[in-house]
Amino acid sequence: MEKTLGYLGPPGTFSHEAALNYCKGRACRLKPFATIKQIFAATANKTVDAGIVPVENSLEGSLNLTFDLLAGNIAVKIKGELHCRVRHCLLAPPGLKIEGIEKVYSHPQALAQCRRYLEKILPKAAPIAATSTTDAALQVAQYNNRGAAIASRRAAELYRLAVLQENIQDGPGENKTRFLLLAPEDASATGRDKTSLLLTLPDRPGALYAALGIFAHHNLNLTKIESRPVRGNLGKYIFFLDVTGHRKDARLAEALLETKEKNIKVKILGSYPRAENCE
């Protein structure tokens, strides 16, 4: 049966690329949304069967909005993840050369991922934030005002823009973005799973040390730990953890029971198969 998958649109974004990769071999109908918050809402109220959202980039780190929405939403679980290559291109209307570019449009994350390139190649061009990389490409295509866009090659094809340069992201290594698959329920155990957790700790010395020690005691590997401030409460933090294993695995289930006994609040964000890689 065909499933509806929400993604951060419009078509041509890197989220669109990730959604297309996820749908290979699956019966999917793609539905674009203007914001990540809308994808969470559509998944929660079952307007879509699932949603795909960016959460972390190998160059620029975590996307805080996605973490905040995970923390505040009880109707959405993480059902999967993908690690996708991001190849940024400099796009412009046909005929515009690099030396004639006065503005560069893109999503703030993309601008940040290409910061050194812009400083070196286009130091006088003004960076202008757009709601998505594709929105940047659309603005450049529509207004043709000596502006260029940082977006995907697919966006260039969709909106008839010229690719001036490819792979302009900073850094010698691969630029990869981690995407999460959201759904009303998480995934069944596969034997190669990961579980994402949200910890709220009691206000006492050594609370974080004690919480992490529980996972170590049960020989569980924590692959990620990240703190986020509690909104409106300066100095207080919540902690996002990724741990190997499924929440129904005996060792992890015992560890989660122990956290409850020690007054450590744990929200299970979802158990799911470890990353599928996409190109």
Image (cartoon, rainbow, N blue to C red):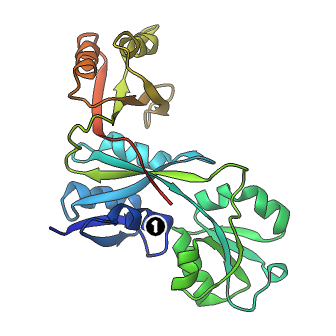
Using residue 225 as the reference point, say whether residue 192 is left or right of it: left
Crowd tier of the residue under label 1, counting other residues whose Cα lies within 10 Å: few below 14, some 14–19, many 20 or above: many
Q: Label 1's element?
A: helix
Residue 237 shows in this picture: no
Q: Which residue is nearer to you in this view: 23 or 121?
A: 23
Residue at the spot 73% in from the left edge and 50% down from the top edge: 172
Q: Position of residue 44 (x, y in %)?
A: 22, 54
Q: Which image quadrant is residue 49 in?
A: bottom left
Q: Position of residue 211 (x, y in %)?
A: 39, 15
Write down the residue under mark 1.
17
For the view shown, which residue lies furthest in the left direction? 1
Q: Quadrant of the N terminus?
A: bottom left
Q: Which residue is nearer to you in this view: 201 or 231?
A: 201
Indicate the amino acid at tag 1. Answer: Glu
Q: Position of residue 244 (x, y in %)?
A: 37, 29
Residue at the spot 41% in from the left edge and 10% down from the top edge: 210
Residue at the spot 46% in from the left edge and 7% down from the top edge: 205
- The number of numbered badges drawn on the structure is 1
Residue at the spot 66% in from the left edge and 56% down from the top edge: 112
Q: Is residue 62 above or below residue 24?
A: above
